Image: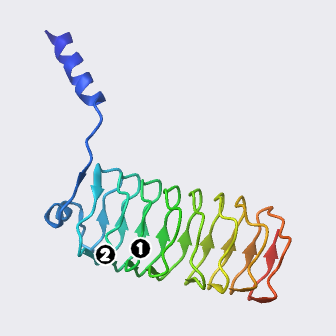
Amino acid sequence: MYKRFILVITLLLSLPVASEGIDKYQLLNYLDNYGNIDLRDKPFDSLPTGLKVKGNLNISETPITRLPADIDIQGSLNASNSKLRSVPAGVKIKGYANLLGTQVKSWSRGVRVGGFINFTDTPLEKLPARMQVKGDLSVIRTPLKELPNGLVVDGNLYIGGSAITTFPETMTVKGNIFLGGNQITKWPTKLNLGGAVAR
């Protein structure tokens, strides 16, 4: 009898956890006193529309594939190693956006981010023209082949392990450019560089 009970428990624990959306009331279970919402490694696959987060939002290692277009995050977004692939125009993130290991392939022009943007280890293929980044920009180990013309990066630019071999005609990087071993065959005719270039 005891062995049969153990077998049933083992089988139940081995079953995959079904994904489901989370509503505004359920979110209260994951909200702390500072307004941060931590859904890390939870089974939820969607967020409610009209969501305003007073602090940080952590959706790392979740099956969430898309952020609501009207989401307003007053802190930062940590979506590392989640299934996130769509960040639509209208999304507001006052802090940084950590997208490391997500499934994001392109970035919409109308997304507002107040800090660095980390695309490391994503399938990123396209960034919008005249994109402005308020902190560092990392496209390390992505298939991205080119940076957008008129790109402005207030911090450092990291491109090591990407497919980038040429830079756009006009580009501003107020910090340093870290090539990470990439060989650049074409440099901008108008490069506003505040720091140095590191090979």
For the point 17% across and 16% down, which residue is it?
Answer: 5
Looking at the image, residue 46 lies above or below residue 19: below
Where, quadrant-wise, is the C terminus in this rendering? bottom right
Q: What amino acid is found at the position of numbered circle 2 in the picture? A: Ile
Asked if labels 2 and 1 touch by Cβ distance under 8 angstroms, the answer is: no
Q: Position of residue 106 (x, y in %)?
A: 53, 67
> Closer to the camera, 121 or 155?
121
Q: Position of residue 47 (x, y in %)?
A: 27, 63
Q: Earlier in the sequence, mark 1 or mark 2?
A: 2
Q: Quadrant of residue 30?
A: bottom left
Q: Residues within 10 Å of mark 1 (few under 14, many from 20)?
A: many
Helix, strand or loop at mark 2? loop
Looking at the image, residue 18 lies above or below residue 160: above
Position of residue 139 in the picture relative to residue 134 (left or right): right
Looking at the image, residue 60 lies above or below residue 157: above
Helix, strand or loop at mark 1? loop
Where, quadrant-wise, is the N terminus in this rendering? top left
For the point 29% across and 48% down, which residue is it?
Answer: 43
Look at mark 1 in the image and give the residue it sits on: 76
Look at mark 2 in the image and give the residue it sits on: 71
Q: What amino acid is found at the position of numbered circle 1 in the picture? A: Ser
Q: Residues within 10 Å of mark 2 (few under 14, many from 20)?
A: some
Distance CA(mark 1)–CA(mark 2): 12 Å
For the point 35% across and 80% down, which residue is it?
Answer: 74
Q: Position of residue 98 (x, y in %)?
A: 49, 66
Q: Quadrant of residue 53?
A: bottom left
> Closer to the camera, 100 or 167?
167
Position of residue 72 in the picture relative to residue 7 (left or right): right
Q: Position of residue 140 (x, y in %)?
A: 65, 62
- Camera-near label (1 vs 2) is 2
Position of residue 171 in the picture relative to residue 7 (left or right): right
